[in-house]
Amino acid sequence: MGTAFNTALSALNADSTAIDVVGNNLANLNTTGFKESDAEFSDLMAEQLGTSTSNGQVGLGVGQLDSVQNFSQGSISTTSGALDAAIQGNGFFVVKDSSGNQLYTRDGSFQLDGSGNLITATGQNVQGWMASNGVVNANGAATNVTVPVGSTIAPSATTTMSMSVNLNSATAVNGTYSSPIQVYDSLGTAHTLTVTYTETAAGAWSYSVTVPQADLTSGSSNVVATGTLAFDSSGNLTSPAAGSPIAISVSNLADGANTMNINWNVYNAAGTGQITQYGQASSMSSPTQDGFAAGQVSTVSIQNGGLVVAKYTNGQQVTLAQLAVASIANPTSMVQVGDNNLQATAATAQAALGAAGAGGNGTIEGGALEASNTDMASEFTKLLTYERSYQAASRVITTADQLTQDTVNLIH
């Protein structure tokens, strides 16, 4: 009879612990990146009653309960946070605490501190690889991801430009059409170049490129390029020949910038002329050039794939870093250390760090967060099951106690 008490007591202890596990899962129903735990029960060794056959065995109850984390994928939802990130698939974000301990998390609600360090919501430094000239090498050791807050990107002078232009074939001789395009000098100052086309004969035009006189030092000519264009009977450009960009040189700039040497590409990469002469109104579209003014960081965001990108006030976009993703073969061996972080134990396999999508790593979705994978309906079902189990074990103790009392009464 004594074993009945111990057996039922082991069940009460196990069910109490299982209810604690369910309670923790439900408490973290809204915790970003949380992974629920499953209660795993196991029986105790049975005792042999009188015979050597298995039919004479009686169990001794339930053993110590194991709580094992379930790393199934949580749902991913888009957010308005530029620095939010979520992993779809295998892997963990890598972070370091103030003591330098390497931790792992699925919570991608990141932010910047006052020094420009990318940190978690609870202050751990996010790990990754910093870019050099916009290029990331993910083969080295991961470091803290730091954003140059308040930094300025230097200006870049225009070296190439292009535009799509149609010159109306019905234009009379000496008729003109003008198209402007903005370019930048070495100091980042913007200048407007105006290309004026003049029809000289059927299928023949001259052009003149000018810059505002005010942009030049006194006495300098504002005509920076001249030449001629020729078209065939289908309105396609034949001269200058493909592969021969038009050279434009702008010197004696009033702001003291270097001479601008610009190649005007009148053909695209496929060798098709970007200037045509069709029987339609003269027009210009798609002006492009590769220069830009100086600019300051305006926003920093995490893009799909885990790239940390800075956007500048001059419209430029520069890759700053790549977030690291850790792949761990046996994640259930890690322990929870709070703040949505996990720490490796002696039983944890070596973490393999790499970029998102590489080496079996999951992908990173920027501007998104992974929800808790706790299933409320499933947890309530477990809760009811453990409650019934607890009540049943309590009834066993009550029955065993009653039988004991009856036995004592028989003796007396």
Image (cartoon, helix red, strand yellow):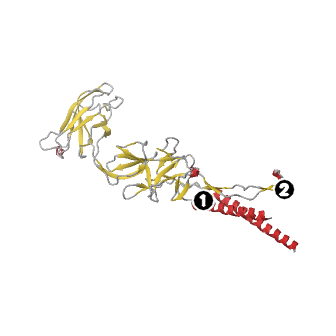
**As displayed, is residue 397 above or below residue 209?**
below
Q: Work out which residue is located at the far left of the displayed protein and give it.
A: 219
Mark 2 is on which residue type? Answer: Gly
Question: Residue 344 location in percent, x, y?
Answer: 53, 52
Give the structural element (helix, strand or loop) at label 1: helix
Q: Residue at x 34, y 54 (%)?
A: 149
The N terminus - image quarter: bottom right
Q: Residue at x 87, y 72 (%)?
A: 411
Q: Work out which residue is located at the far top of the displayed protein and give it.
A: 233
User: Label 2: how many residues lie within 10 Å, few (<14), some (14-19) or many (20+)?
Assistant: few
Q: Are marks 2 and 1 in contact (CB under 8 Å)?
A: no
Q: Residue at x 34, y 29 (%)?
A: 272
Question: Residue 399 location in percent, x, y?
Answer: 80, 67
Question: Residue 350 location in percent, x, y?
Answer: 52, 46
Please tell me which residue lies in front, 196 or 392: 392
Relative to residue 100, is residue 288 drawn left or right?
Answer: left
Q: Which of the two discs, 2 and 1, sits closer to the camera? A: 2
Q: Work out which residue is located at the far bottom of the displayed protein and give it.
A: 412
Please tell me which residue lies in front, 95 or 286: 95
Q: Which residue is mark 2?
A: 50
The C terminus - image quarter: bottom right
Question: Residue 249 location in percent, x, y?
Answer: 20, 36
Q: Which residue is mark 1?
A: 25
Q: How many marks?
A: 2
